[in-house]
Amino acid sequence: MKKPLVSIIVPVYNVEQYLSRCIESIIYQSYSNIEIILVDDGSRDNSGTICDKYAFVDKRVKVIHKVNGGQSTARNAGLDIAKGDLITFVDSDDFISQDYILSMYETMDKFSCDIVQCDYETGAGDSFKKDVKEFCIKIISNIEALSGFSYKVVVWGKLYKRDIIGETRFPVGKINEDDATYYIFAYNAKKIALSNEILYYYFMSENSTMRNRNHNIKLDFIEIYNNRIQFFYNNKKQYLVDKSYERFAIVLILTYSSLIGDFKQSNSSHIILNNFKNIYQIVRKSNNIKWKYKAVFNAFYLSPIFIGKIIRLIKKS
């Protein structure tokens, strides 16, 4: 039986230094029935030309050249033309293992899952150390995925059945586009596989264009979490409503701690505190939120600056 077509969507913007590494890691996949959709999001360097070069030598490569609109518009453009039964996303300054698709597809097929998540390694330049782990796969439900932290917020590093994504698209003009969609994808799934196999390599650099278009703190996540809460409320999933409030409170605290001492962000700090105060009574009273989180929430409510500084110290240690 012929294996299903997998659409690999790659948003591209000013990454000429790393783009060939990314594309070649996809072209030389051990799973060959793929289409590679490179979306040039108005690059000002040679990224668009590099995309066209690979399309010329490999018929599986499709290139979209578009006016710059951000990573969400690039991913959406790829989704709109994708023909695969399965879909995955790769960022253009990252790269993937040769067995990235094959390993996740075999897991999906073996366990009849709707989403498979692999593990990833973070590095800079060519410095990526692959940890040796005892191979492990955990099968969880959508409720379990949305209740904890083992199912990652990011949309890359996952293989999706096409109908899990459906007509959902990434929000335009937001910098937390993964946060706005990953919970919808997870909710649409019945079974999710979490693999600890490192198949994705996440490139970190101060000059990484795809990840640093917005240098100032933006508070898009507040609207996104309110939308998430409303989504589960509309679907009559009170448990997931409460768990969303829990995660929202955690993100508010972490963001506030990162802004302490930055007078340019004082207005953002004020907005964060107001939002936390608005949901404090909800998280404090919920029976679905663990006591250890409630303890942190109580302490932050009483002394946000003190708790914020402690969190900063912990993160630096």
Image (cartoon, grey):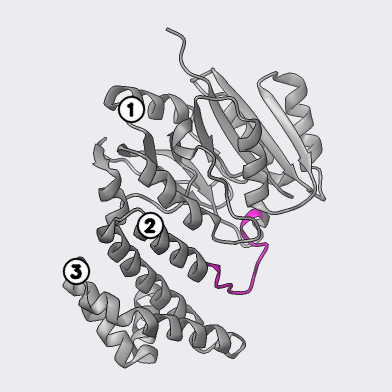
Say which residue appears at 37% left-offset and 33% top-offset. Answer: 114
Query: In what element is the residue under mark 2?
Result: helix
Depth order, front residue of 104/268: 268
**Residue that mark 1 sits on:** 107
Labels 1, 3: front one: 3
Tell which tag, 2 or 3, sits nearer the viewer.
Answer: 2
Q: CA distance from mark 1 to mark 3?
A: 32 Å
Residues packed near mark 3 inside 10 Å, few (<14), some (14 to 19) or many (20 plus)? few
Q: Nearer the viewer, residue 70 or 254?
A: 70
Residue 63 position in % (x across, y down): 73, 32
Residue 103 versus residue 132 in the image, above or below = above
Residue 271 x, y percent position in the rendering: 51, 84
Q: Earlier in the sequence, mark 2 or mark 3?
A: 2
- Does the rendering let one see residue 17? yes
- Where disc 3 sits, the SS reads loop
The amino acid marked with disc number 2 is Asn
- Circle 3 sits on which residue? 290
